[in-house]
Amino acid sequence: MAKRIMDFEQFSLYADFEKIVGIILERNGFRIEEPSKAAGYDYLAVIENTFAYVEVKLYKSKLPKLDLLRKACDRLLSQRDNQNAKLILVISSYVTPSLKQEIFDDSGIIIWDARILLALAFDFSTIYYDLQSILVRAFDAPLDDTFVVDNGVKSEIISSLISSRTSVRSVPVINIGANLCSELHKLKPGRADAANFENKCIEILKYLFKNNTDLTLWEPQPITDDGLHRFDLLCRIISIHQNTFWAELAHDFHTRYVLFEFKNYTDEIKQGQIYTTEKYLFLTALRSVSFIIARNGADENAVKAAKGALKEAGKLIVILTATDVCDMLNLKDKGDEPAVVLRKKIDDMLVALTR
């Protein structure tokens, strides 16, 4: 196993980033308020006679995934209940000027990326370095020339916001993930709906991760070369994109492929299911990671067996419940990274692992 492993402390970054965005807004003359929890944005920001709904997204890649960016824009647009309200989506990644303009033309949403945040923070040394620290920790890499601040544009950022005009109106957002979650829970546990559960899980995984940056291949029920074993789904990790969950997974566990198994059991799965899955994993075949989607989770012995496979053979077996899957779907609907749930599951295993 590689020395570098995914850092469970990364989860505090989401709160840290949202907080520092609020501080930057205040230092630049905005009066900010936190809306009710029911609102689909993080801040109401007011400056002069202009008010804006501000949504904050921390992404761990220097360039955002377009599917998540579009989801975040759709959700923010659905919150516009006053045509005079400006809409600002603040993200930690870099967005090209042409994409910013395209998004504004389509949705009326103004994108403030990391470069704009750095420009707005530039005159406040402590805040500037705190922001840099958050970005470096999020990307797990130094900032490159993409994030060099053009301090000359700082004066234009707020004036451009105030003068912006759009005729795009709010539209209801279609929560595909919520619909998929509902469909998953409508299936009955047990053998009768086992095939339907498997097919629905594959449909869900494709919604979550089939985006030209995460997973490819999507080979259902491949058979091992000895003809003795058949597993449910095999995917190939697209590892050329930096700072993604799957690229980190490929690096940390020396894997190129990831195996998915689906268990629509009425009860928790037992250690026997873990041992069966472990047989399918081979480090020499670059296939050392598996995710088991078990409708009702796993019992204590199954969890111990999964930890044993990691300790003794370096094979990572992560158990996900139907609730975990729905949590990922909810994140995707909001334009957040669904892999947050997977990171947390793996971190929990690694942190608690003993000799």
Image (cartoon, rainbow, N blue to C red):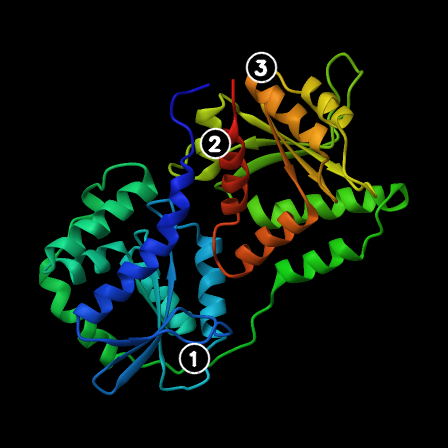
Task: Name which residue type carries label 3.
Answer: Glu
The residue carrying mark 1 is 168
Q: Residue at x 11, y 59 (%)?
A: 124
The residue carrying mark 2 is 351
* Circle nearer the N terminus (1, 2): 1
Callout 3: SS: helix
Q: From this viewpoint, which residue is outermost toward the right? A: 192
In the image, which disc is placed on residue 312?
3
Residue 296 x %, y % = 74, 44
Residue 215 x %, y % = 55, 37
* Circle nearer the N terminus (3, 1): 1
Residue 300, placed above or below residue 205: above
Task: Name which residue type carries label 2.
Answer: Val
* Circle nearer the N terminus (3, 2): 3
Residue 235, placed above or below residue 105: above
Which callout, 1 or 2, points to the residue nearer the camera?
A: 2
- Name which quarter of the figure residue 9 lies in: top left
- Name which quarter of the figure residue 236 lies in: top right
